Image (tube, rainbow, N blue to C red):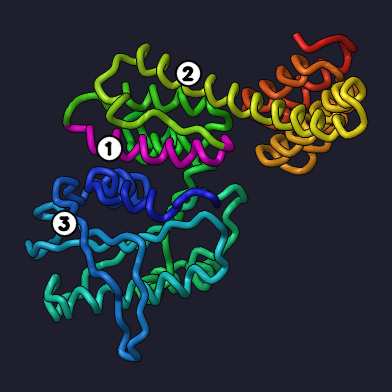
Amino acid sequence: MAMRHDEAFKFLFDLPEVCADALRVAAPALWPHLDPASVRILRTGDSVAPDLSKRQGDALFAVDLREGALADGRRAYLVAPTEFQSSDDMGMPDRVREYALRQLDTLRRQGVIPAGDTPPVLALVVYDGAAPWKAADGLEPLRHLPPAAALHLGPYQPQAYVLLDLVRSRTDDWGEYNRLGAVARLLRARSLDRLLATLVEEFTRFAGSQHRPFREALHAWAGELWTRLADGGELPTFAALEGLEASDMTSMIEARIAAWKEEHFGRARAEGVAEGVAQGRAEGVAQGRAEGVAEGLSHERTMLSRLAARRFGAAAGRAVAEAVAEVGDAADLERIGDLIVDCPTEDRLLLALADVAGRREPVA
Protein backbone atom coordinates (compact mmCIF):
# COMPACT_ATOMS: atom_id res chain seq x y z
CA MET A 1 0.00 0.00 0.00
CA ALA A 2 1.10 3.55 -0.65
CA MET A 3 -0.36 4.73 2.65
CA ARG A 4 1.43 4.74 6.01
CA HIS A 5 -0.65 1.80 7.08
CA ASP A 6 0.53 0.91 10.58
CA GLU A 7 0.99 4.54 11.60
CA ALA A 8 -2.61 5.36 10.69
CA PHE A 9 -3.90 2.38 12.68
CA LYS A 10 -1.64 3.09 15.68
CA PHE A 11 -2.90 6.68 15.80
CA LEU A 12 -6.43 5.28 15.85
CA PHE A 13 -5.81 2.57 18.46
CA ASP A 14 -4.13 5.07 20.74
CA LEU A 15 -7.70 6.03 21.72
CA PRO A 16 -9.15 3.82 24.50
CA GLU A 17 -12.69 4.27 23.15
CA VAL A 18 -11.63 2.77 19.79
CA CYS A 19 -10.09 -0.20 21.61
CA ALA A 20 -13.35 -0.63 23.56
CA ASP A 21 -15.39 -0.61 20.34
CA ALA A 22 -13.03 -3.24 18.87
CA LEU A 23 -13.66 -5.48 21.89
CA ARG A 24 -17.41 -4.96 21.56
CA VAL A 25 -17.23 -6.40 18.04
CA ALA A 26 -14.58 -9.06 18.63
CA ALA A 27 -16.05 -10.61 21.79
CA PRO A 28 -19.81 -9.95 22.03
CA ALA A 29 -20.34 -12.75 24.59
CA LEU A 30 -17.52 -11.38 26.76
CA TRP A 31 -18.49 -7.72 26.37
CA PRO A 32 -21.13 -7.60 29.18
CA HIS A 33 -18.45 -8.76 31.65
CA LEU A 34 -15.95 -6.02 30.67
CA ASP A 35 -15.64 -2.49 32.04
CA PRO A 36 -15.11 -0.28 28.94
CA ALA A 37 -14.19 2.73 31.08
CA SER A 38 -11.13 0.83 32.30
CA VAL A 39 -9.50 0.35 28.89
CA ARG A 40 -5.89 1.48 29.06
CA ILE A 41 -3.13 1.56 26.44
CA LEU A 42 -0.03 -0.46 27.33
CA ARG A 43 3.33 0.49 25.89
CA THR A 44 6.08 -2.09 25.97
CA GLY A 45 8.38 -0.62 23.33
CA ASP A 46 10.49 -3.43 21.84
CA SER A 47 9.69 -6.86 23.27
CA VAL A 48 13.01 -8.62 23.81
CA ALA A 49 13.24 -12.43 23.98
CA PRO A 50 15.89 -14.31 25.99
CA ASP A 51 17.88 -14.70 22.76
CA LEU A 52 17.92 -10.85 22.61
CA SER A 53 15.86 -10.72 19.43
CA LYS A 54 13.41 -7.81 19.27
CA ARG A 55 9.84 -7.41 18.09
CA GLN A 56 7.60 -4.38 18.50
CA GLY A 57 3.88 -5.18 18.46
CA ASP A 58 1.45 -2.91 16.67
CA ALA A 59 -0.84 -2.18 19.64
CA LEU A 60 -1.49 -3.50 23.12
CA PHE A 61 -4.20 -2.62 25.62
CA ALA A 62 -5.88 -4.01 28.72
CA VAL A 63 -9.40 -3.88 30.16
CA ASP A 64 -10.78 -4.87 33.57
CA LEU A 65 -13.56 -7.36 34.07
CA ARG A 66 -16.52 -5.87 35.88
CA GLU A 67 -16.64 -6.22 39.63
CA GLY A 68 -18.29 -9.50 40.53
CA ALA A 69 -17.44 -11.16 37.20
CA LEU A 70 -15.39 -13.77 39.06
CA ALA A 71 -17.12 -16.09 41.51
CA ASP A 72 -14.41 -15.64 44.17
CA GLY A 73 -14.72 -11.85 44.08
CA ARG A 74 -11.22 -11.19 42.74
CA ARG A 75 -10.62 -8.42 40.23
CA ALA A 76 -9.31 -9.61 36.88
CA TYR A 77 -8.26 -8.01 33.63
CA LEU A 78 -7.82 -8.96 29.98
CA VAL A 79 -4.82 -8.14 27.76
CA ALA A 80 -5.43 -7.62 24.04
CA PRO A 81 -2.36 -7.65 21.73
CA THR A 82 -3.43 -6.27 18.34
CA GLU A 83 -1.84 -6.58 14.90
CA PHE A 84 -2.69 -4.51 11.80
CA GLN A 85 -2.63 -6.25 8.43
CA SER A 86 -3.11 -4.99 4.87
CA SER A 87 -2.28 -8.38 3.32
CA ASP A 88 -2.97 -12.01 4.16
CA ASP A 89 -0.37 -13.78 6.31
CA MET A 90 -0.54 -17.57 6.43
CA GLY A 91 1.81 -17.60 9.41
CA MET A 92 -0.40 -15.40 11.58
CA PRO A 93 -1.18 -18.07 14.26
CA ASP A 94 2.54 -18.53 14.93
CA ARG A 95 3.12 -14.77 14.98
CA VAL A 96 0.22 -14.24 17.39
CA ARG A 97 1.57 -16.85 19.80
CA GLU A 98 5.08 -15.36 19.70
CA TYR A 99 3.96 -11.74 20.06
CA ALA A 100 1.55 -12.43 22.92
CA LEU A 101 4.13 -14.36 24.95
CA ARG A 102 6.83 -11.76 24.35
CA GLN A 103 4.60 -8.84 25.26
CA LEU A 104 3.37 -10.48 28.47
CA ASP A 105 6.95 -11.25 29.45
CA THR A 106 7.98 -7.65 28.79
CA LEU A 107 5.06 -6.31 30.84
CA ARG A 108 6.12 -8.49 33.78
CA ARG A 109 9.75 -7.38 33.56
CA GLN A 110 8.61 -3.75 33.42
CA GLY A 111 6.43 -4.26 36.47
CA VAL A 112 3.28 -3.25 34.56
CA ILE A 113 1.69 -6.54 35.62
CA PRO A 114 2.75 -8.57 38.68
CA ALA A 115 5.30 -11.29 38.03
CA GLY A 116 2.89 -14.06 38.98
CA ASP A 117 -0.09 -12.78 36.98
CA THR A 118 -1.33 -14.78 34.02
CA PRO A 119 -4.16 -12.62 32.62
CA PRO A 120 -6.37 -14.01 29.86
CA VAL A 121 -5.33 -12.88 26.38
CA LEU A 122 -7.58 -11.94 23.47
CA ALA A 123 -5.46 -11.42 20.36
CA LEU A 124 -6.94 -9.25 17.61
CA VAL A 125 -5.97 -8.94 13.94
CA VAL A 126 -7.40 -5.85 12.25
CA TYR A 127 -7.43 -6.34 8.47
CA ASP A 128 -8.17 -3.91 5.65
CA GLY A 129 -6.75 -5.75 2.63
CA ALA A 130 -8.40 -5.94 -0.79
CA ALA A 131 -8.46 -9.76 -0.93
CA PRO A 132 -10.41 -11.98 1.49
CA TRP A 133 -8.44 -13.19 4.51
CA LYS A 134 -7.54 -16.88 4.13
CA ALA A 135 -4.99 -17.49 6.88
CA ALA A 136 -5.81 -20.00 9.63
CA ASP A 137 -7.31 -18.48 12.78
CA GLY A 138 -5.42 -20.76 15.16
CA LEU A 139 -8.40 -22.90 16.11
CA GLU A 140 -8.10 -25.46 13.30
CA PRO A 141 -6.59 -28.14 15.59
CA LEU A 142 -9.82 -28.14 17.62
CA ARG A 143 -12.44 -28.15 14.87
CA HIS A 144 -12.53 -31.89 14.22
CA LEU A 145 -12.29 -32.98 17.83
CA PRO A 146 -15.26 -34.11 19.94
CA PRO A 147 -16.83 -31.02 21.61
CA ALA A 148 -15.73 -32.05 25.10
CA ALA A 149 -12.13 -32.53 23.96
CA ALA A 150 -12.14 -29.20 22.10
CA LEU A 151 -13.47 -27.43 25.19
CA HIS A 152 -10.73 -29.00 27.30
CA LEU A 153 -7.91 -28.11 24.89
CA GLY A 154 -9.15 -24.60 24.07
CA PRO A 155 -7.22 -22.88 26.89
CA TYR A 156 -4.01 -24.38 25.56
CA GLN A 157 -4.25 -22.75 22.13
CA PRO A 158 -2.41 -19.42 22.58
CA GLN A 159 -2.08 -18.99 18.82
CA ALA A 160 -5.79 -18.25 18.26
CA TYR A 161 -6.96 -14.74 17.38
CA VAL A 162 -10.10 -12.86 16.36
CA LEU A 163 -10.09 -11.33 12.87
CA LEU A 164 -11.74 -7.93 12.39
CA ASP A 165 -12.14 -7.50 8.62
CA LEU A 166 -12.94 -3.83 8.07
CA VAL A 167 -13.65 -4.25 4.36
CA ARG A 168 -16.02 -7.23 4.29
CA SER A 169 -17.64 -7.46 7.75
CA ARG A 170 -21.31 -6.52 8.22
CA THR A 171 -20.73 -3.28 10.07
CA ASP A 172 -24.49 -2.77 10.47
CA ASP A 173 -24.25 -5.37 13.23
CA TRP A 174 -21.62 -3.29 15.03
CA GLY A 175 -23.93 -0.44 15.96
CA GLU A 176 -24.28 3.04 14.47
CA TYR A 177 -21.80 4.65 16.85
CA ASN A 178 -19.07 2.02 16.76
CA ARG A 179 -15.90 3.92 15.90
CA LEU A 180 -14.31 0.99 14.10
CA GLY A 181 -17.41 0.91 11.90
CA ALA A 182 -16.79 4.55 10.98
CA VAL A 183 -13.27 3.67 9.85
CA ALA A 184 -14.64 0.72 7.86
CA ARG A 185 -17.06 3.04 6.04
CA LEU A 186 -14.17 5.31 5.08
CA LEU A 187 -12.14 2.35 3.84
CA ARG A 188 -14.98 1.28 1.55
CA ALA A 189 -15.09 4.61 -0.30
CA ARG A 190 -14.09 4.00 -3.91
CA SER A 191 -13.97 7.59 -5.16
CA LEU A 192 -12.95 10.98 -3.82
CA ASP A 193 -16.59 12.09 -3.86
CA ARG A 194 -17.66 9.08 -1.75
CA LEU A 195 -14.73 9.63 0.61
CA LEU A 196 -15.84 13.25 1.04
CA ALA A 197 -19.45 12.29 1.76
CA THR A 198 -18.43 9.59 4.25
CA LEU A 199 -16.03 11.87 6.14
CA VAL A 200 -18.70 14.55 6.51
CA GLU A 201 -21.23 11.94 7.67
CA GLU A 202 -18.85 10.61 10.32
CA PHE A 203 -17.84 14.07 11.52
CA THR A 204 -21.53 14.79 11.97
CA ARG A 205 -22.20 11.46 13.67
CA PHE A 206 -19.33 11.97 16.13
CA ALA A 207 -19.90 15.66 16.82
CA GLY A 208 -19.02 17.28 20.14
CA SER A 209 -15.81 18.13 21.97
CA GLN A 210 -15.58 14.67 23.57
CA HIS A 211 -15.14 13.11 20.11
CA ARG A 212 -12.54 15.59 18.81
CA PRO A 213 -9.57 13.15 19.11
CA PHE A 214 -11.52 10.54 17.16
CA ARG A 215 -12.46 13.05 14.44
CA GLU A 216 -8.78 13.90 14.14
CA ALA A 217 -7.95 10.19 13.73
CA LEU A 218 -10.69 9.88 11.07
CA HIS A 219 -9.25 12.87 9.24
CA ALA A 220 -5.79 11.26 9.27
CA TRP A 221 -7.28 8.11 7.75
CA ALA A 222 -9.18 10.11 5.11
CA GLY A 223 -5.98 11.94 4.18
CA GLU A 224 -4.14 8.66 3.69
CA LEU A 225 -7.02 7.16 1.71
CA TRP A 226 -6.95 10.22 -0.56
CA THR A 227 -3.48 9.08 -1.67
CA ARG A 228 -4.99 5.74 -2.73
CA LEU A 229 -7.62 7.38 -4.88
CA ALA A 230 -5.82 10.39 -6.33
CA ASP A 231 -2.45 11.11 -7.88
CA GLY A 232 -1.71 14.42 -6.22
CA GLY A 233 -3.75 16.95 -4.29
CA GLU A 234 -4.68 16.59 -0.64
CA LEU A 235 -7.54 16.86 1.81
CA PRO A 236 -8.05 20.21 3.61
CA THR A 237 -6.39 20.20 7.02
CA PHE A 238 -8.23 19.08 10.14
CA ALA A 239 -7.98 22.59 11.56
CA ALA A 240 -9.66 24.00 8.45
CA LEU A 241 -12.56 21.52 8.63
CA GLU A 242 -13.04 21.36 12.40
CA GLY A 243 -16.03 23.32 13.64
CA LEU A 244 -17.64 23.82 10.22
CA GLU A 245 -21.25 22.97 9.49
CA ALA A 246 -21.68 19.89 7.30
CA SER A 247 -22.62 21.99 4.26
CA ASP A 248 -19.57 24.23 4.61
CA MET A 249 -17.31 21.21 5.12
CA THR A 250 -18.74 19.62 1.98
CA SER A 251 -18.21 22.79 -0.05
CA MET A 252 -14.59 23.10 1.07
CA ILE A 253 -13.70 19.49 0.21
CA GLU A 254 -15.65 19.61 -3.08
CA ALA A 255 -13.63 22.66 -4.08
CA ARG A 256 -10.42 20.78 -3.30
CA ILE A 257 -11.56 17.79 -5.40
CA ALA A 258 -12.50 20.07 -8.30
CA ALA A 259 -9.10 21.75 -8.11
CA TRP A 260 -7.40 18.36 -8.13
CA LYS A 261 -9.35 17.26 -11.23
CA GLU A 262 -8.51 20.45 -13.08
CA GLU A 263 -4.85 20.27 -12.13
CA HIS A 264 -4.50 16.54 -12.83
CA PHE A 265 -6.16 16.41 -16.23
CA GLY A 266 -5.15 19.93 -17.25
CA ARG A 267 -1.50 19.20 -16.52
CA ALA A 268 -1.56 15.94 -18.45
CA ARG A 269 -3.22 17.62 -21.42
CA ALA A 270 -0.89 20.63 -21.36
CA GLU A 271 2.22 18.49 -21.05
CA GLY A 272 1.12 16.30 -23.91
CA VAL A 273 0.28 19.21 -26.21
CA ALA A 274 3.50 21.06 -25.32
CA GLU A 275 5.60 17.97 -25.94
CA GLY A 276 3.94 17.34 -29.27
CA VAL A 277 4.19 20.98 -30.41
CA ALA A 278 7.87 21.10 -29.49
CA GLN A 279 8.53 17.95 -31.47
CA GLY A 280 6.53 19.27 -34.41
CA ARG A 281 8.43 22.55 -34.66
CA ALA A 282 11.42 20.67 -36.03
CA GLU A 283 9.32 19.71 -39.06
CA GLY A 284 7.61 23.03 -39.60
CA VAL A 285 5.41 25.28 -37.49
CA ALA A 286 2.11 24.52 -39.25
CA GLN A 287 2.63 20.79 -39.37
CA GLY A 288 4.10 20.84 -35.89
CA ARG A 289 1.03 22.43 -34.32
CA ALA A 290 -1.24 19.78 -35.81
CA GLU A 291 1.06 16.98 -34.78
CA GLY A 292 1.52 18.56 -31.36
CA VAL A 293 -2.18 18.55 -30.69
CA ALA A 294 -2.41 14.95 -31.89
CA GLU A 295 0.54 13.98 -29.71
CA GLY A 296 -1.09 15.71 -26.73
CA LEU A 297 -4.34 13.84 -27.24
CA SER A 298 -2.43 10.57 -27.55
CA HIS A 299 -0.61 11.34 -24.31
CA GLU A 300 -3.88 12.07 -22.53
CA ARG A 301 -5.41 8.80 -23.82
CA THR A 302 -2.45 6.96 -22.31
CA MET A 303 -2.84 8.86 -19.02
CA LEU A 304 -6.54 7.98 -18.82
CA SER A 305 -5.80 4.31 -19.41
CA ARG A 306 -3.13 4.35 -16.69
CA LEU A 307 -5.43 6.15 -14.26
CA ALA A 308 -8.20 3.58 -14.80
CA ALA A 309 -5.73 0.71 -14.33
CA ARG A 310 -4.44 2.27 -11.13
CA ARG A 311 -7.94 2.70 -9.68
CA PHE A 312 -9.65 -0.49 -10.85
CA GLY A 313 -7.06 -2.83 -12.32
CA ALA A 314 -5.58 -3.85 -15.68
CA ALA A 315 -8.91 -4.89 -17.25
CA ALA A 316 -10.38 -1.43 -16.64
CA GLY A 317 -7.25 0.15 -18.11
CA ARG A 318 -7.66 -1.87 -21.32
CA ALA A 319 -11.36 -1.00 -21.52
CA VAL A 320 -10.61 2.71 -21.26
CA ALA A 321 -7.83 2.44 -23.85
CA GLU A 322 -10.34 0.91 -26.31
CA ALA A 323 -13.00 3.51 -25.48
CA VAL A 324 -10.74 6.52 -26.07
CA ALA A 325 -8.84 5.18 -29.08
CA GLU A 326 -11.03 7.07 -31.58
CA VAL A 327 -11.86 10.10 -29.43
CA GLY A 328 -10.32 13.17 -30.99
CA ASP A 329 -11.78 15.95 -28.88
CA ALA A 330 -9.94 17.13 -25.73
CA ALA A 331 -13.19 18.04 -23.96
CA ASP A 332 -14.57 14.53 -24.53
CA LEU A 333 -11.40 13.01 -23.10
CA GLU A 334 -11.73 15.22 -20.04
CA ARG A 335 -15.30 14.02 -19.50
CA ILE A 336 -14.13 10.42 -19.69
CA GLY A 337 -11.50 11.33 -17.12
CA ASP A 338 -14.30 12.57 -14.85
CA LEU A 339 -16.03 9.20 -15.26
CA ILE A 340 -12.87 7.38 -14.13
CA VAL A 341 -12.61 9.55 -11.03
CA ASP A 342 -16.32 9.68 -10.15
CA CYS A 343 -17.46 6.09 -10.79
CA PRO A 344 -17.35 4.22 -7.47
CA THR A 345 -16.71 0.77 -8.95
CA GLU A 346 -15.19 -0.85 -12.03
CA ASP A 347 -18.62 -2.16 -13.09
CA ARG A 348 -20.10 1.35 -13.02
CA LEU A 349 -17.19 2.64 -15.08
CA LEU A 350 -17.58 -0.10 -17.71
CA LEU A 351 -21.32 0.59 -17.97
CA ALA A 352 -20.65 4.30 -18.45
CA LEU A 353 -18.05 3.59 -21.13
CA ALA A 354 -20.46 1.22 -22.91
CA ASP A 355 -23.08 3.95 -22.88
CA VAL A 356 -20.60 6.40 -24.39
CA ALA A 357 -19.64 3.92 -27.13
CA GLY A 358 -23.31 3.13 -27.89
CA ARG A 359 -24.19 6.77 -28.49
CA ARG A 360 -21.24 7.28 -30.87
CA GLU A 361 -21.24 10.99 -30.06
CA PRO A 362 -19.33 13.30 -27.70
CA VAL A 363 -19.65 12.32 -24.05
CA ALA A 364 -22.47 14.21 -22.31
Q: Main secondary structure of the magenta part?
A: helix
* Crowd rating for badge 1 (residues with CA inside 10 Å; few <14, some 14–19, many 20+): many
The residue singled out by tag 2 in the image is: 254
Viewed as shown, does residue 77 lie left or right of 131?
left
Q: Residue at x 20, y 51 (%)?
A: 34
Q: Nearer the viewer, mark 2 or mark 1?
A: 2
Magenta span of residues: 210-231
Q: Is residue 13 above or below residue 178?
A: below
Say what secondary structure mark 3 lies in: strand
Is residue 146 among the parts visible in the rendering? no
Q: State the image coordinates of residue 316 (x, y, percent, origin top left).
A: 77, 36
Q: Residue at x 12, y 75 (%)?
A: 111
Q: Amino acid at mark 2?
A: Glu
Which tag, 3 or 1, sits closer to the chain's start?
3
Q: Nearer the viewer, mark 3 or mark 1?
A: 1
Say what secondary structure mark 2 lies in: helix
Q: Residue at x 32, y 63 (%)?
A: 81
Viewed as shown, does residue 271 lie left or right of 170?
right
Viewed as shown, does residue 257 lie left or right of 343?
left
Q: Amino acid at mark 3?
A: Asp
Structural distance between the alpha carbons of marks 3 and 2: 44 Å
Q: State the image coordinates of residue 63 (x, y, percent, origin top left).
A: 19, 56
Viewed as shown, does residue 44 lie left or right of 172?
left
Is residue 186 among the parts visible in the rendering? yes
Say what secondary structure mark 1 lies in: helix
User: Among all residues in the image, which is located at the extreme bottom?
Assistant: 51
Q: Nearer the viewer, mark 3 or mark 2?
A: 2
Q: Is residue 214 above or below residue 82?
A: above
Q: State the image coordinates of residue 246 (x, y, percent, origin top left).
A: 34, 15
The residue singled out by tag 1 in the image is: 214
User: As rendered, which of 263 and 21 lies closer to the eye?
Assistant: 263
Which tag, 3 or 2, sits closer to the chain's start?
3
